[in-house]
Image (cartoon, rainbow, N blue to C red):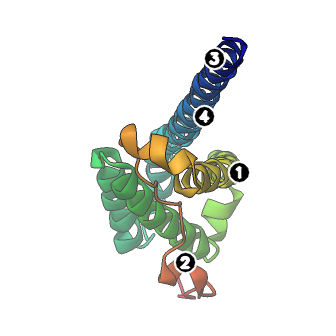
């Protein structure tokens, strides 16, 4: 009788311990998933702020009559694509394209002393540079969150519960091959 009682107590203790373990793992996975969503939302907020600043920048640059139209068209089209993107992957790609277009605009602007000296242009350039830095910081936090999440859902025994929760690995925010190359500044005469 004592052996059965001890056995039942130990079995109950193990069952409760296992349930507590499952709850801890489940809550940890939920926390990681929510953290990724929050990290992406933070990036999205900054992308929206940058998208809101681009028309102001384009308007200031358009004031210089001889400024290259193709550069402005590229920036405007990139912004439109970025605003239309829905998925994380599409937004990330559109963001990369817009960043490249803005970098090209700033590089070409170096050839226009009148533009470079305008206070509005300098203010917008500084604001966009600050947003770029903030976006880079948030991308890093997002990638850290994704890496931790992907590691947890792949490790045993968490992978079993992650599978039951239909959790799938998330994509890291990576640079495209073109972004890894050194930026070539095009010099033209105004």
* Lower sequence index among marks 3 and 4: 3
Q: Position of residue 31 (x, y in %)?
A: 59, 31
Classify mark 2: helix, strand or loop.
Answer: helix
Classify mark 3: helix, strand or loop.
Answer: helix
Q: Crowding near pointer 3: few (<14 within 10 Å), some, many (20+)?
A: few
Q: Crowding near pointer 1: few (<14 within 10 Å), some, many (20+)?
A: few
Q: Nearer the viewer, residue 98 or 20?
A: 20
In this figure, which residue is indicated by the disc labeled 3?
4
Up the image or down, 167 lies above or below 21; here it is below
* Comparing labels 1 and 4, the label whose residue is closer to the camera: 4
Q: Does the image show residue 128?
A: no
In this figure, which residue is indicated by the disc labeled 2?
179
**For the point 67% across and 53% down, which residue is it?**
144
Q: Are marks 3 and 4 in contact (CB under 8 Å)?
A: no
* Comparing labels 3 and 2, the label whose residue is closer to the camera: 3
Q: Position of residue 53 (x, y in %)?
A: 51, 42
Residue 137 disc label: 1
Classify mark 1: helix, strand or loop.
Answer: helix
Q: Nearer the viewer, residue 105 or 65?
A: 105
In this figure, which residue is indicated by the disc labeled 4?
25
């Amino acid at each position: 009788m004592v052996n059965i009682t001890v056995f039942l107590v130990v079995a109950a203790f193990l069952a409760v311990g296992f349930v507590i373990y499952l709850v801890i793992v489940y809550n940890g996975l939920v926390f990681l998933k929510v953290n990724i969503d929050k990290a992406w939302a933070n990036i999205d907020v900054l992308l929206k702020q940058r998208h809101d600043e681009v028309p102001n920048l384009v308007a200031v640059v358009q004031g210089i009559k001889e400024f290259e139209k193709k550069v402005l068209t590229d920036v405007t089209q990139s912004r439109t694509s970025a605003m239309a993107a829905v998925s994380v992957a599409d937004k990330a790609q559109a963001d990369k394209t817009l960043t490249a277009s803005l970098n090209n605009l700033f590089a070409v602007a170096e050839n226009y002393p009148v533009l470079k000296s305008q206070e509005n242009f300098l203010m917008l350039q500084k604001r966009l540079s600050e947003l770029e830095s903030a976006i880079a910081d948030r991308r890093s936090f997002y990638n850290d969150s994704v890496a931790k999440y992907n590691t947890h859902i792949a490790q045993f025994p968490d992978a079993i519960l992650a599978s039951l929760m239909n959790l799938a690995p998330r994509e890291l925010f990576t640079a495209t091959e073109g972004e890894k190359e050194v930026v070539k500044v095009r010099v033209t005469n105004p």
